[in-house]
Amino acid sequence: MLTATELYPLTTTLWIVLWVEVVIYLGTGLYEAFDDYYYKSPKWVFVNERLNTYIWFRDKKNHKMHASLAMVLGLIALNGVLEGAVFRFEIELIFISLALLNMSIWCMAPPCKQLAWKMLPVAPEFHLQYISFMFFADLIRLEVLALCVFFNLWGIFVFFRRTLRLSEAPQTYEELRAHMVEAGAGADLVMWDKVLGHKEPEATEL
């Protein structure tokens, strides 16, 4: 384990991980932080074909909070790349941020096992966290490592004990897709159709 003031020179693996985080998270954070004139409000912020300002505010707030977390994670990674080394606290922040993101993915996974199991391989947080645990767990404090494990376990617990038990929740992708169509989830709908290989039935000629 590193001491509080000890610098850890970047290895090839850590250098690659940090650059991936810079590209994904700093890029996403910068775009979402300044996309106010490009962001298109989703269909669900309209009630009775009229913009509901409260729902719009909640959606916008979640969007900007995502941008904030992404930028923090991306800036930590960028600092490590520029300095060529990282402190223990910087590595711990990366561990905790990835663990929180993975916890959120589990907690907010749709109550459809068919889709939920395919969300993890798509999420970069899952792979980055796995690599971090594999190669850099010995650099951080044991209590921080335990906290990261707890965050992940809590997300999994909520998914199985809460999310999957929601009343009237869709249990197949076809049922969930109907909800997505109703909510106007255009881009997400196209992405998950491709991931799950969903094809609309061809219209039969009369």
Image: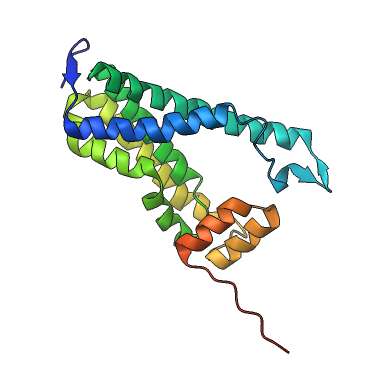
Residue at x-position 30% and y-position 30%: 18
Identified at 80% across, 45% down, the residue is 47
Q: Quadrant of the C terminus?
A: bottom right
Q: How many numbered dots are placed on residues in this image?
A: 0
Q: Position of residue 10 (x, y in %)?
A: 19, 25
Q: Quadrant of residue 13?
A: top left
Q: Position of residue 38 (x, y in %)?
A: 65, 35
Q: Is residue 132 above or below residue 5?
A: below
- The residue closer to the viewer here, 67 or 2, is 67
- Can the viewer see residue 90? yes
Which residue is at the far top?
Answer: 5
Residue furthest to the bottom: 206
In the picture, which quadrant includes the N terminus?
top left
Residue 144 rendering spot, x and y as whole percentages? 28, 25
Name above or below for residue 140 compared with residue 6: below
What colour-coding does the image apply?
rainbow
- Please report the residue visible at 46 percent of the width from the left and 49 percent of the height from the top: 159
The quadrant holding residue 175 is bottom right
Position of residue 188 in the picture relative to residue 142 (left or right): right
Residue 111 in view in this figure: no
* Left or right of 63 in this view: 29: left
Task: State the residue at coordinates (59%, 51%).
Answer: 187
Horizontal relation, residue 96 to residue 110: left or right? left
